[in-house]
Image (cartoon, helix red, strand yellow):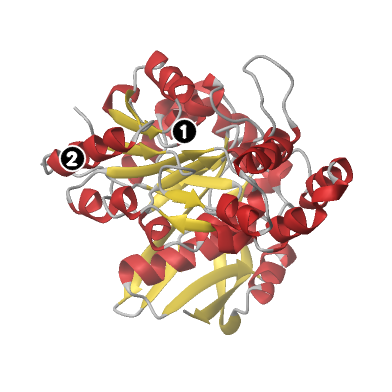
Amino acid sequence: MIRNIVFDVGYVLVDYTWKYTFKDFGYDDEGVKRLAAGIFGGGVQGEALTLWQSYDNGLVSDAQVRADILRRFPDDAPALTWFFDNAADWCTVRHDLADCIAPLKEKGYGIFLLSNYPDRLWQLHVAAQAFHALVDGEVVSYAEHIGKPGLHFYERLLARYRLNAEECLFLDDRRDNTLAAESLGMQTLTLDSPDARRRAVETLAALPKLEQPCPVDWIETADLLLAKGRLSDWRGMYENVWSHAETARYMLWSVTTSEPDAIARMERTIRFQSEHDTYLVYDKHSLRPIGFAGLELLDAESCGETGIALGPAFVRRGYGKQIVQALCRRAKTVYGAKTFIYSAREKNMASRALAASLGFQPFERETRLDERNGELYTLIRYRLAL
């Protein structure tokens, strides 16, 4: 049973008009093909990546790809300079399929993007489009440094969002890409002709409403995924977080000292998370659990964090800021909160600096007892208008 729709982007949800402007520069059909080959290359599966494929995979910069192409084709500099300087102008939405996304969401389907795309062009062509706001998750080559049709790219999508391949329908304009998806058990539609696109639109429109909509029970940031814990996460949490005294220092929990205790703690964590808006924090690329975070509704207009922790190997990377910002967004969009409350111990200078960097203002100080050691500490509460 299909529960998730996975879209490629280029030539599926968006199209490109640069070829028509190249003709305005005086190129005939053969000249346009020559320019296209010069820009994009003709990469063959199993051979070295072309320059553009490396650009897709975030391995070369905008400046590098531009300089290299202009160096190799100096006689075509006017058209190529236009191509790079006006990238936002030569992309258009293909509404036949893009307009299917909102109805699919209303029927309860998960919507995902799986695409080979460079960072700068993704921001210009995709991130600002209306359909992008409806997407539940995405795996894009520039961020992953790999791409289609490599199987690891597809597997990353399935693992990150905990999708069953058999429940996914993948749409792509290239047969080599859909073949790769099929090898993992995904259902596919290859959009290699106008008739194939028309049939795809009909197929998507005919999908029934799901009795149980796909839950989106994760929070995503640039580098992290906040998701519900699983029993298999016990070792990662034990090794990365729970066994470290420096992580527990300003928290209310004690260090876990054995593997059996870590397994039992993971079981308790899973039960707690099933009833609360709390999560484990995962490195988005490796999917290692590296911390935990959560939030709760305090009153009709306020939410607060329920504790944020990162293992010592994962601090000073900007992850704390990503987590707090993500919790604030969730507080505003899910709970309609107007204020977010953040707390830090007076001696926890890193947490206090984080609060200040995000614009939180202190409004309350309270003396409390640390029941682990009988010591008093001062808790500072901060608030931020959302």
Identify the residue position indicated by label 2 in the image.
202
Q: Between residues 177 and 369, which one lies in front from this camera angle? A: 177
Quadrant in which the N terminus appears: top left
Q: Is residue 359 shown above or below 44? A: below
Residue 354 x, y percent position in the rendering = 67, 67
Residue count near mark 1 (Cα–Cα under 10 Å), binned few <14, some 14–19, many ≥20: many
Q: Is residue 204 shown above or below 250? A: above
Q: Visible in this render: residue 252?
A: yes
Tell me what residue is drawn at x 72 percent, y 26 percent.
49
The amino acid marked with disc number 1 is Leu
The quarter of the displayed image where residue 190 is located = top left
Identify the residue position indicated by label 1 in the image.
157
Residue 7 x, y percent position in the rendering = 39, 40
The amino acid marked with disc number 2 is Glu
Q: Is residue 367 shown above or below 116? A: below
Tell me what residue is drawn at x 25 percent, y 36 percent.
200
Give me the C-alpha separation between circle 1 and circle 2: 25 Å
Residue 327 x, y percent position in the rendering = 47, 62
Tell me what residue is drawn at x 41 percent, y 48 percent.
13
Indicate which disc, 1 or 2, sits on the residue closer to the N terminus.
1
Position of 102 compared to 66: left or right?
left
Give the structural element (helix, strand or loop) at label 1: helix
Q: Between residues 23 and 103, which one lies in front from this camera angle? A: 23
Q: Between residues 380 and 9, which one lies in front from this camera angle? A: 9
